[in-house]
Amino acid sequence: MSQQASLPRGFQTAGFTCGIKASGKPDLSLFVSTVPASAAGVFTTNKVCGAPVIVSRSRVPSSTSRAVVINSGNSNAATGAPGIANAEAMTATLANCLSCPPADVLVCSTGVIGVPLPMPLLQSGIPQAFALLGDSDQHLLDAATGIMTTDTFPKLTSCDVAVRGGTVRVSGVCKGAAMIAPNMATMLGVIMTDAPLAPEQCAAMLKAGVDRTFNCISVDGHMSTSDTVLLLANGASAVTLSDDDLQQVAEAVRVVCQHLATSIIRDAEGADHFITVDVTGLATRDFAWRMAKEIAESALVKTAITGGDPNWGRIVSAAGYAGVDFDTAYVSLKINGTEVYRAGTPVPFDAASLSTALKTNRDVHLELAVGGGPCSGREAVRFWTSDLTAEYVRLNSEYTT
Amino acid sequence: MSQQASLPRGFQTAGFTCGIKASGKPDLSLFVSTVPASAAGVFTTNKVCGAPVIVSRSRVPSSTSRAVVINSGNSNAATGAPGIANAEAMTATLANCLSCPPADVLVCSTGVIGVPLPMPLLQSGIPQAFALLGDSDQHLLDAATGIMTTDTFPKLTSCDVAVRGGTVRVSGVCKGAAMIAPNMATMLGVIMTDAPLAPEQCAAMLKAGVDRTFNCISVDGHMSTSDTVLLLANGASAVTLSDDDLQQVAEAVRVVCQHLATSIIRDAEGADHFITVDVTGLATRDFAWRMAKEIAESALVKTAITGGDPNWGRIVSAAGYAGVDFDTAYVSLKINGTEVYRAGTPVPFDAASLSTALKTNRDVHLELAVGGGPCSGREAVRFWTSDLTAEYVRLNSEYTT
């Protein structure tokens, strides 16, 4: 997994160790635009959400955002009214450095739940981190590192787009590797671009990108209280975007989101396999998404792949309980390119060699196609997941109180 | 788990080894009423369902049912049109013994998926099993044993109800312990009563009972292709039931269903803990059910309990993503009677002693209460589940092809 990426123009970042984590690892990151930026966000739909989600959600979309401050090691979730005040204080501290209103600063937190934030550490740490801001690749890597919890590697990427009169860059970082006790190890992402975008363009591009990437991954199906992806666009590229250019930028946002989202699955806790699930031929995208998600989240599908077992019955039956109307007589399934089920009937295949392939390749491809019938259509979804191993259980059941 | 239960009047059962299972364990069971009985069934809603589900579903409700034939070791699922013919042939073979129409015989199968039934074994085995029919407790135990797959103990119970002019008995057997490769180890249940019930009364009682029991358990959230619960009522008690009596019989059906359903959770694959989830205070029963189910099926809740970790954040956050509108400011949670979260705020508790209690007791009780707010109400649901252990992963990931 490459850890090389560059910032768009007009952005500076920093990573810092302010002392929240007992491990002494970096736990504070800043993402700053040198000029006011358009901003949009996508947030967890969990009714139990962290204080930073409540604060940041109220501040986007915006045309005057300046920065995002993120701490790891403490999620500031389930902390009541004092938690809201602490999230607001974090933004006020950074706003003070930037001489901007606190409302122009967004905030995320990830880590242990139900514990008050150690505000003195943050109040002294944020100005110290501010003094470290810079726009080099190392600064971006530092910021990607400062938001990690149980991640084993920092997750970052950037993508250049040639447009009329210049180039635009889209860069992003994220963190996440499942939820692990005592941390609610949340999925957080920050995407920055120097493209000139209005707030509503930011919101539309971010939603479209997230829908096909971050919303198409699952490690364990447990939706966090703090999931947040933010997009900031500061226009520092000084180009004017045609409609075609806008489509290219939107595609770059999607590509960056996909790189980040799949890197979370590559880093999934305890996982031995990276699984791509393609579902095709449904009447609506939502139907295809629900079917792919059920396959991806089935403990029995995951454990079969852990064991290198081409147990297609588990895959087909998971599709069957997705609450989607379809006719099994039109369903076919391939595992790593080998057809095992065609038009609702088992197909003879070399189980031993397919099993060997599953055991020797980290990447697994499941292709479920609905090939006809009254409920079929042309909609498709790609979904990514990991397998379920004894190591995942060990990581998540160790005594932590 | 008591394995002592008695048949209602007018029922005979048998268990037999016809040779489907390579292990040589019993694999064929018959449940016969000596007189035509009312019958109702509840079946999997999986779109990918076994041939026996298709055949039996078409034959209930009925007022002339005579028997149920069940084989284990082969689920006759994903077997196409020949599978339907084989399921029908099984009923025809038993109907021939009984001199009744095949439509008066119901059929279930559980075991490996996608493999044609070994019909010669069944065609010779069914008459041999028929010759063994009897009404002793041992006969019922034999029938409960013949339907087992990965179960570690047979599951059966009976319940007597005093009614005006006599007694009525409700007895049942079931099997199930999750789905394990290569078997689609299905949940199957057969409930028999000598109460005089019309088919529609059977259907209503069975649905009400199953909704609060078999539909409130989950080992791994993977809905089988073959799940079936059948109720046969033959009237052999020769009593006339008042409305009060009918309610008592319905309650007995629910009690029998609950005993059987919870015995599946007690036998869950690899499980160390038996977990009861109570959700109270919702506006609708469906809301409470969805919230309880999300808690019960969360891999992170399950692994926390495996590790004896009173990690309440995982429980509350699982409730939060159930798609149910509620206000977290009114939510409270108890773990084994210890309040850990009250009105949306963490409550200090002795984590070490609660952890010890979780580690030393097999039974865990989670009580999530929504205590007010505009979305609250008086509806409650009890749900049962097991924890998730490395042993579950081992059992389900072993190489089987």
Image: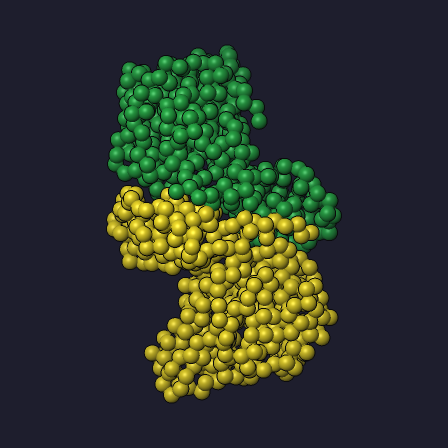
Chain colours: A yellow, B green
Judge whether B54 appears above or below B13 on screen: below
- Closest to the observer, B195 or B85: B85
Residue at horizontal 50 percent and vertical 75 percent from the top: A4
Residue B221 image position (x, y, % from top left): 47, 44
A270 sits to left or right of B205: right
Where does residue A158 sit, x and y in percent of width and height?
A: 46, 75
Q: B385 or B252, which is in the foreground?
A: B385
User: Which residue is rendered at x = 45% and y = 29% of the image?
Assistant: B148
Left or right: where does residue A343 sit relative to residue B367? left
Quarter of the image where one finds residue A49? bottom right
Residue at 54% in and 16% down? B162
Q: Quadrant of residue B128?
A: top left
Please, is residue A227 above or below residue A238 in the view?
above
Q: Is residue A48 visible?
A: no
Residue A305 seen by the camera: yes
Residue at position x 32%, y 36% in the image: B115
Q: Quadrant of residue A346?
A: top left
Residue B122 x, y percent position in the rendering: 32, 24
Report x, y in % for residue B224.
Answer: 41, 39
Please count the marks in the image.
0
